[in-house]
C-alpha cells in the first residue's frame, strides 16, 4: 500500500465551541473529529474539501464505527467540483462484511500464465516461471445459491511502485477480494474502496527522500570554504619572523 502519514493528535481548543466537535466510540476508544481537522489532516488529494463534504465524512465514520486516527478511513478528492471518494482499510472493509448476518466466507487467489496455460491458484504463491496476470475471488452469501465471482487484471491496478513493485501478488489478490465482497454486499459495502484500488492523484509528485538529503548535503559541502588567507591576524606585537604552527 502507498505511505500513509500520521496526523498529530488533536488537542481540544479552548476557543472552539463544543458543538463543532463530533464525538463517538470505536472499540471502547473515544474519537473526536471536527470539520477543520478532517480538512487539514485526514483528507487527501489535490482539491480542497468543502465544509459539507468534511461533515458528511464525519457522519460516515460515526455511523460505521470507523476510527480515522487508526487509518481505518480517509477520503480523497481529485478535482474541484467532484465528490470525494471514501477509502477504508482492508480490515475495516472485512469487518463490515463479516458483520453481515448473510456472510458465508470467501475464496481468493491469483490468475497466472504457466507455460501455455492460464491457471487460477488459491492464495498468493507463484511458482518459478509463472507470470502474474491478475487476481480472483469468490464471496459467499448464505441466502444465495451461487457465489459472487470477481476477476481483476494486474495491468489495471499496478502502479509499479512501493508494494505493487515488491508484493504484486498480495496486492492484486486483495483487490479481487474487495471486488467480490462489494458485489455480494452492495448495501453494506457499495461505494467503499480500499487504497489499493485507487490511482495516485494526477498532480501528485513523488520525490525520493534519500536523493533530496544527498542534494542538501552536497549543497552544504559546496559552501565557500574558510581559507587560512582570510583569517585576520591575531592582535599583538609584531614578530620578526612567523613562528611555525605546532604539529606541522
Image (cartoon, helix red, strand yellow):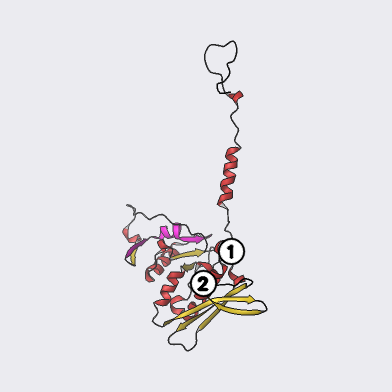
Q: Is residue 202 left or right of residue 42?
A: right
Q: Which residue is outermost to the right?
A: 116
Figure quadrant of residue 27: bottom left
Within-10-Å neighbours for mark 1: few <14, some 14–19, many 20+: few
Q: Nearer the viewer, residue 118 or 47?
A: 118
Q: Residue 143: horizontal and vertical position, in percent?
A: 43, 87
Hey, which quadrant is residue 240 in on the image? top right
Could you tell which of marks 1 and 2 lies nearer the N-terminus? 1
| Residue 80 image position (x, y, % from top left) | 53, 63
Left or right for 186, reference 117:
left
The residue that disc 1 covers is 165
Mark 1 to mark 2: distance in Å? 15 Å
User: Residue tagged by mark 2?
Assistant: 174
Q: Residue 92 carries which label?
A: none
- The quarter in which the C terminus is drawn is top right
Q: Position of residue 116 (x, y in %)?
A: 68, 79
169 is higher (above) or lower (below) than 234: below
Report if residue 61 lies within the magenta region: no
Residue furthest toward the bottom?
145
Label 2: which secondary element: helix
Q: Position of residue 228 (x, y in %)?
A: 59, 25
Q: Which of 137 and 180 is in front in this view?
A: 137
Report the residue at 56% width, 70% height from top: 169
Magenta extent:
28-46
Q: In this view, does 204 lie above or below 210?
A: below
Amino acid at each position: 500500500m502507498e505511505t500513509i502519514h500520521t496526523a498529530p493528535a488533536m488537542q481540544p481548543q479552548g476557543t472552539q465551541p463544543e458543538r463543532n466537535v463530533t464525538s463517538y466510540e470505536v472499540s471502547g476508544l473515544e474519537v473526536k473529529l471536527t470539520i477543520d481537522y478532517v480538512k487539514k489532516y485526514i483528507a487527501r488529494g489535490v482539491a480542497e474539501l468543502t465544509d459539507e463534504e468534511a461533515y458528511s465524512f464525519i457522519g460516515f465514520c460515526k455511523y460505521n464505527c470507523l476510527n480515522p486516527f487508526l487509518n481505518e478511513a480517509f477520503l480523497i478528492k481529485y478535482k474541484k467540483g467532484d465528490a470525494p471518494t471514501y477509502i477504508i482499510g482492508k480490515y475495516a472493509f472485512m469487518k463490515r462484511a463479516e458483520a453481515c448476518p448473510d456472510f458465508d466466507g470467501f475464496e481468493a487467489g491469483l490468475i497466472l500464465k504457466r507455460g501455455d496455460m492460464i491457471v487460477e491458484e488459491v492464495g498468493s504463491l507463484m511458482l518459478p516461471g509463472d507470470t502474474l496476470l491478475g487476481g480472483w475471488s469468490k464471496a459467499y452469501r448464505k441466502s444465495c445459491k451461487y457465489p459472487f465471482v470477481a476477476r481483476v487484471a494486474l495491468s489495471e491496478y499496478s502502479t509499479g511502485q512501493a508494494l505493487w513493485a515488491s508484493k504484486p501478488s498480495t496486492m492484486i489478490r486483495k483487490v479481487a477480494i474487495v471486488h467480490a465482497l462489494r458485489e455480494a454486499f452492495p448495501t453494506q459495502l457499495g461505494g467503499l474502496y480500499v487504497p489499493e484500488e485507487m490511482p495516485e492523484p494526477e498532480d501528485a509528485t513523488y520525490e525520493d527522500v534519500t536523493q533530496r538529503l544527498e542534494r542538501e548535503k552536497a549543497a552544504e559541502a559546496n559552501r565557500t570554504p574558510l581559507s587560512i588567507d582570510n583569517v585576520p591576524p591575531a592582535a599583538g606585537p609584531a614578530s620578526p619572523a612567523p613562528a611555525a604552527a605546532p604539529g606541522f
